[in-house]
């Protein structure tokens, strides 16, 4: 069965500092991995995804994530935080088989201090 | 391009009243459709998904139901709302690469 664990329900960084949001997954087959961002009172928006191939994935707004199979991790990073990055971030996994479901982590709220 | 609509955007309903939330998708055919709920400060809970007209899979036993009367229409209903039904309801469809695309959501407050 699939599962996703996001370490830290809240992360606070200063503007210009590195952003690191942690995600570990569990999957019995090769996974598809996603990061979504949610701004207040809005739906989720895809930031980036890993399917196959290159393990370092670049997304929108300067974010990137690296798939590490040996660590079962898919951490999200951004070199320099901006005030507009303040939002909730969700890691998600979907198995590369005939399944229809995507499993979401509990979310990490990112705060950016001026 | 594909778009997904939800309405209403906000709803305040008394306990025991009925509910109907609607989701429609444009620009794609025979999509897999999903209803999620976010309670305050919590993650996404999958409520229902549908792989075709009239085909509904329920993930969590509750007083909610879903229907898919048309290919690109997905409806979430309740006959009698509970206080615990309050939350942010999100509709999504599954695109290429198993990516889920979300609607803008409906904020439901049950009083």
Image (spheres, coloured by chain):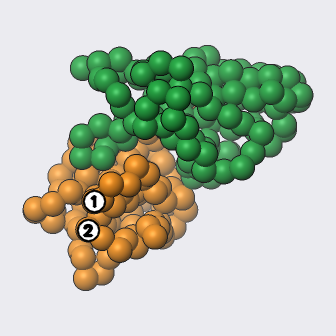
Label 1 crowd (10 A; few <14 / some 14-19 / many >=20)? some
Q: Where's residue A90, x and y in %?
A: 44, 53
Which chain letter matches label 1?
A
Task: Using the rendered view, name the quadrant where residue A82 is placed.
Answer: top left
Which chain letter matches label 2?
A
Instruction: Say which colour chain A has.
Output: orange
| Residue at the (31%, 44%) spot, across then down | B99
Q: Which residue is mark 2?
A: A30
Q: Which mark is residue A62?
A: none
Is residue A69 left or right of A27 when viewed as pictured?
left
The residue lying toward the viewer, choosing from B109 and A7, is: B109
| Residue at the (37%, 59%) spot, across then down | A93
Q: Where's residue A72, x and y in %?
A: 32, 76
Q: Where's residue A27, x and y in %?
A: 37, 71
* Disc 1 to disc 2: CB gap under 8 Å: yes
Q: Where's residue B76, x and y in %?
A: 63, 28
**Residue A22: in sight, yes or no?**
no
The residue lying toward the viewer, choosing from A30 and A6, is: A30
The residue lying toward the viewer, choosing from B11 and A52, is: A52
Asked if A107 appears above or below B1 in the picture, the reply is: below
**Residue B59: in sight, yes or no?**
yes
Q: CA distance from mark 1 to mark 2?
A: 6 Å
Q: Which residue is mark 1?
A: A96
Instruction: Say which colour chain B has.
Output: green
Is residue B32 left or right of A41 when viewed as pictured?
left
């Amino acid at each position: 069965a699939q599962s996703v664990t996001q370490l830290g329900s809240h992360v606070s960084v200063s503007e210009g500092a590195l952003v690191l949001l942690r995600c570990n997954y569990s999957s019995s087959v090769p996974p598809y991995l996603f990061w979504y961002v949610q701004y207040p009172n809005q739906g989720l928006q895809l930031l980036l995804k890993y399917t196959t191939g290159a393990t370092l994935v670049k997304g929108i707004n300067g974010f990137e994530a690296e798939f590490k199979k040996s660590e079962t991790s898919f951490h999200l990073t951004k070199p320099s935080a901006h005030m507009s990055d303040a939002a909730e971030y969700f890691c998600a996994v979907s198995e590369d088989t005939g399944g229809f479901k995507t499993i979401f982590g509990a979310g990490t709220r990112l705060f950016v201090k001026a | 391009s594909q778009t997904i609509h939800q309405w209403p955007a906000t709803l305040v309903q008394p306990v025991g009243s009925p509910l109907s939330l609607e989701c429609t998708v444009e620009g794609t055919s025979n999509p897999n459709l999903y209803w999620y709920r976010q309670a305050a400060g919590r993650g996404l809970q999958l409520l229902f998904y549908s792989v075709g007209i009239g085909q509904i899979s329920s993930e969590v036993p509750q007083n909610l139901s879903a229907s898919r009367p048309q290919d690109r229409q997905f409806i979430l209903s309740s006959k009698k709302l509970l206080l615990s039904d309050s939350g942010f309801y999100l509709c999504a469809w599954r695109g290429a690469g198993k990516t889920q695309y979300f609607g803008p959501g409906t904020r439901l407050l049950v009083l």
